[in-house]
Image: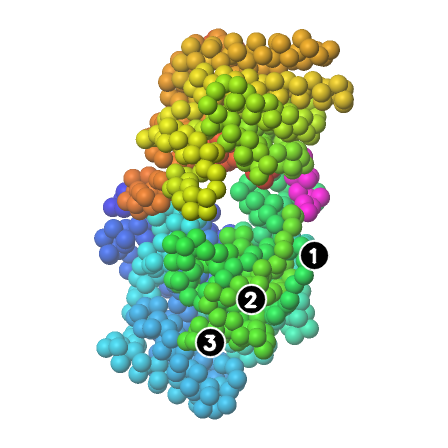
Amino acid sequence: MNADTLEHDMIYYFGEGPVDKELLGGKGANLGRMRSIGLPVPPGFTITTEICNHYTAHNDYPDGFTDAVAANMAKMEEELGKSFGSTGNPLLVSVRSGAAISMPGMMDSVLNIGLNDDSVEGLARQTENERFAWDSYRRLIQMFGDVVLGVEHARFEEALSEVKDSVGAKNDTDLKTGDLKDLVIRFKSIISDEGKTFPQDPWQQLRMSIDAVFMSWNNERAIRYREANDIPDDMGTAVNVQAMVFGNTGKNSGTGVGFTRNPATGENKLYGEYLLDAQGEDVVAGIRTPHPIEDLADQIPEAYEKLQDISDILEEEYRDMQDFEFTVQEGKLWMLQTRTGKRTADAAVKIAVDMADEGIIDRETAVMRIDPESLSQLLHKRIDPDAERTVIATGLNASPGAASGHIVFDPDEAERLVKEQDEKVILVRPETSPEDIHGLVSAEGIVTSRGGMTSHAAVVARGMGKPCITGCKDAAIDLSNQAVWFKDREYGTGDLITIDGATGEIMDGQVAMKDPQLSGEFESLLEWAEEFRTIGVRTNADTPEDAARARSFGAEGIGLCRTEHMFMAEDRMPIMQDMITAESLEERQEALDKLLPMQQNDFADIFKVMEGYPVIIRLLDPPLHEFLPAREDLLGEVVERSLEGRDLTRLGRMLKKVKNLEEANPMLGFRGCRLGIIHPEIFAMQVRAIIRAAATVKKETGNKVKPYIMIPLVSMEEELQHVEDMVRSVATEEISQVDVDLDYKIGTMIELPRACVIADRIARIADFFSFGTNDLTQTTFGFSRDDSEGKFFDGYKREGVMRKNPFQTLDRDGVGTLVKMAVDKARSTKEDMSLGICGEHGGDPASIEFVIGAGLDYVSCSPYRVPIARLAAAQAAIRQP
């Protein structure tokens, strides 16, 4: 949209505008929608995201904007019978942000706008509650001073603490009217000390607050949040101006945050927290520890009963779990917001499956509702219940999962340690605020001493899938000395702890963890995904253990078994090194003969696990020098042994070989099929191991065995034909010696641009293609996967040159075009040729969508990403036109 052109009205009164989140933001659209279905929503209006974009571009509003605000304020005054700025019956309003995508706490709000030295007296007379009026006034000055005038928030908090200490008040609610009047004077003085003035004109307060909320779209924490969650910068925020309702009028009033279902577990039960005699910011700020929402049934039963009814209405209307804010004023319930609630991956799966079973949504919707990447939260390790542990503190289990890390108190330090030293950290704070977002992104987990289950730390952690413990009363945190006492034990920066967000326990040191147990709902969701999935999902696995794990997650075979990984074991590496340093074919063959049964046993175990599914085995691919020590290390060992008078024969041969194998660019050097052409005995040993293992398993189990032999790094059909002839000759020889009818395939990995260009000619020889998109991306871009991330990718992203890392999400324009070309050419030669992808992109949801459109038959990914790929493949199939 052109920021100079307004395509819609500037302002929409609640319930009278379109249900358009892009225009009205999520908050504005949902407030209007709730009001239109008869829920108790205070009146107000939404200033559109188009105005935000105009304001950002011009630092001003379009013509007619001020008149439009005044007209909607007049409409609100007429509806409520109040007057903005009146000293008799004043209308007070809030100004809140609301983007199309929820960004909790990242932008600013201002409450109680309209109060001044005169109207506060009028509010006190009108409500017959002087304490409430002055409490609202001190809140306005504090929030306005911080958000609008830019006075440091801590200065107001210090003044508040001083007044509380002087009168012996434990909580804000213990302050008397006189104390609050004193605070108003102090707060004004703090603002004056900064050379600024709190405006007495309500209309000036309103205008400046709207300005501040629009400007907060581009504050540092909002920008960081958008970067972390891939939210476009040009989306903009709407601004909602809404009549105030008050939860701070006494013990029959309060404010809270709730969910129609438990956002941590998915349990179908009203969940949330509230505070009596409070305003909304008190709950999310974490300053006071709130009550669980079920306590409201005893304290204000009529409001609780109404809240339960509204919870059911919201789920029926939105067909999803809702996160809502509410205020109770003198016993009357008001709804201030609803939105689709953030939830853990556990809860997301349970809610989707339960809602489908309850008939609220269908199975297709349930499948589409889960972010495939979020499933990774369910597949990583958790605390081993049998592990020894020393629990040093307990708090609220705000976000499940477990993590170990070194204590860090400062968000900046957390970010630095992770970026510069790759250290795992746990962020420990009294509470977190939106300014801490970069620390939360960097940390493995979060601990706060204050706040509840809906505090800033809890909400953000759940959205990120990170473990979080809040309201830990056992923790006494001293930020000035960078220390925390968990009960009577002191810990400082760098000390190691483990947290369990599922139980709220904090443990000393590093505690053992174990693989997760997946729920029945998880299995149901993946079964439903099978109804829609059109592409196969295999795994990259090099061991029987990985293969078994992948099968348990639903893998339909192995798309890549990297044989080089099988040589890394301690008992095999010396034999592999002897093979590499051999000075004659006979010496090399002697070493290969020792390796053959080892490989054969590995392959046999993998074939057994796969139970007749295809197993694609890549012949040795990496350069041989990768199996040898670094030259510098060898030189050091030679010196050490020579001083000890020990034999240097083997080391000398290895040092000589390392020197001979040195390459300027090993990635493009002596590896892959080139190795098999120059040293065919290496590939021959592997083929014998594959065929013998397949024959043995078929004899022993009677199961069908499907060995697929993959020749790596082919760029010419002559290379493939040369190696293919050797492979087929060895395979035929082996099969002739066993009484087994064995079917095998020979194919190649397409990982070089030239192979894509001549794919039709390569397809005449190969039975199958597997696209190795890691190397294909490297050779297409000329980027090194190992070096680019730390050298220039960050700069590319920052400068807008490249938005996504092409090694994580497939580059459709370049690499994708080559893949499509190869697919078309291969199928022009062999219409039913098997084509798949085995690079890291095989587990990336966005890349999977491309793969389906390109016409491939399967994707292959690491075992833990198999469920992610299964779900992503189903969703991509559903989205296909």
Whole-percent x, y for residue 125 in the image: 45, 84
Q: Amino acid at mark 3?
A: Asp
* Residue 602 visible in the shown view: yes
Q: Nearer the viewer, residue 672 or 108?
A: 672
Q: Residue at x 57, y 20 (%)?
A: 685
Give the extent of the magenta segment.
517-529
Q: Residue at x 42, y 47 (%)?
A: 643
Residue 289 falls within the magenta-colored stretch: no
Q: Secondary structure at mark 2?
A: strand
Q: Nearer the viewer, mark 1 or mark 2?
A: 1
What residue is disc 2 on? 470
Q: Amino acid at mark 2?
A: Thr
Q: How many labels were placed on the picture? A: 3
Q: Pointer 3: residues within 10 angstroms few (<14), some, or many (20+)?
A: some
Q: Nearer the viewer, mark 2 or mark 3?
A: 3
What residue is disc 1 on? 385
Query: With respect to residue 800, does 740 lie above or below?
Result: above
Q: Pointer 1: residues within 10 angstroms few (<14), some, or many (20+)?
A: few
